[in-house]
């Protein structure tokens, strides 16, 4: 796709957080108001206000939506779809779509990470499917197949298929997926959003060259996750 514009440093709040932030501000303000008018001593009011501000700033941090544009070549690249930490890099049997062995790379997003998800490869959306399930802790292996999740399959220009799975965690109760079947998609675009603690799995072909290690921190739309067709795109092994 040629050289991209240099990534922007501007930060904004994600539109998925507007309702939560407004309602949260109203609730916390009501609590502080009650403490001020119904408790004779001022200490509870100051403590309550400090705690309320701390909680609200955490929620605001959670709904950050940095504008990032990848400034390198994207052909053959799989970019990290989320901020977080690598918790799985292993060969697994993927039995819901591929029904064969794939390399699974999983990124766990804590409460303090940006929870916007980015499209990991340029291509066409072949499948979008939401599945209900449990709400195990997102870093557990069984979360990938038992938790509520949204699956997106993307086909690159050379016919390679990449599966991205958004997984709800113990606190998450809403997965938002923007991708629609049949649409073209590109690195730099948002794939979706997961609220309050979650995980994203990426399933790669066995010949993909993985660029990340276990426990490594990732930045969505910035950290290279893997290279596809390594010898064809000129990257060194």
Image (tube, rainbow, N blue to C red):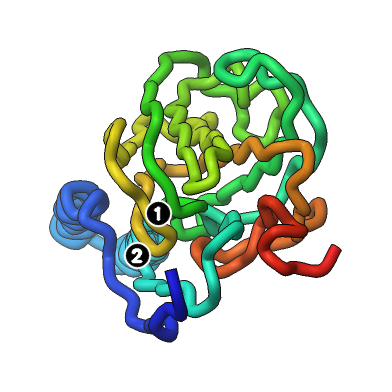
Query: Judging from the image, what secondary structure is the residue with disc 2 in?
Result: strand
Residue visible at 68% across and 57% down in the picture: 227
Q: Residue under label 1, please give it.
A: 116
Residue 146 numbered tag: none
Contact between labelled residues 1 and 2, with CB atoms less than 8 Å apart: yes
Going by the image, does 50 lie left or right of 107? Answer: left
Residue 55's spot in the image, x, y percent?
39, 58
- Residue 166 or residue 154, whichever sits in front: 154
Q: Which one is in front, 105 or 160? A: 160
Residue 137 locus on image (x, y percent): 62, 30
Residue shown at the point (50%, 64%) measured from the top left: 221
Image quarter for residue 105? top right
* First-in-chain label (2 vs 1): 2
Write the residue at 48% across / 31% down: 168
Label 1 SS: strand
What is the CA distance from the residue labelled 2 to the residue labelled 1? 7 Å
Q: Is residue 160 above or below residue 83?
A: above
Picture quadrant where residue 206 is located: top right
Residue designated by label 2:
65
The quadrant in which the N terminus is found is bottom left
Q: Taking the image as drawn, is residue 234 in sight?
A: yes
In depth, the one of 20 and 214 nearer the eye is: 214
Provide residue 216's location: percent of width, then percent of height: 75, 60
Q: Nearer the viewer, residue 233 or 110?
A: 233
């Amino acid at each position: 796709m040629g050289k991209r514009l240099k990534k922007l440093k501007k930060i904004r709040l994600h539109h998925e957080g507007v309702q939560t932030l407004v309602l949260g501000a109203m609730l916390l303000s009501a609590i502080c108001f009650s403490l001020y008018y119904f408790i004779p001593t001022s200490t509870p009011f100051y403590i309550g206000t400090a705690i309320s501000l701390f909680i609200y700033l955490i929620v605001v941090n959670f709904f950050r939506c940095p504008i990032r544009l990848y400034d390198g070549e994207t052909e053959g690249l799989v970019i990290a779809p989320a901020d977080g930490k690598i918790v799985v890099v292993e060969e697994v049997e993927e039995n819901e779509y591929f029904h064969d062995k794939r390399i699974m790379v999983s990124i766990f997003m804590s409460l303090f990470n940006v929870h916007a998800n980015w499209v990991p490869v340029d291509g066409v959306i072949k499948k979008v499917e939401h599945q209900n399930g449990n709400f195990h802790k997102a870093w557990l292996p069984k979360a990938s197949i038992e938790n509520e999740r949204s699956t997106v399959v993307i086909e690159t220009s050379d016919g390679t298929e990449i599966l991205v799975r958004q997984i709800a965690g113990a606190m998450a109760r809403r997965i938002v997926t923007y991708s629609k079947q049949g649409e073209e998609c590109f690195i730099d675009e948002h794939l979706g959003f997961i609220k309050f603690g979650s995980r994203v799995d990426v399933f790669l072909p066995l010949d993909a060259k993985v660029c990340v290690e276990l426990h490594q921190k990732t930045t969505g739309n910035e950290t290279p996750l893997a290279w596809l067709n390594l010898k064809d795109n000129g990257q060194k092994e």
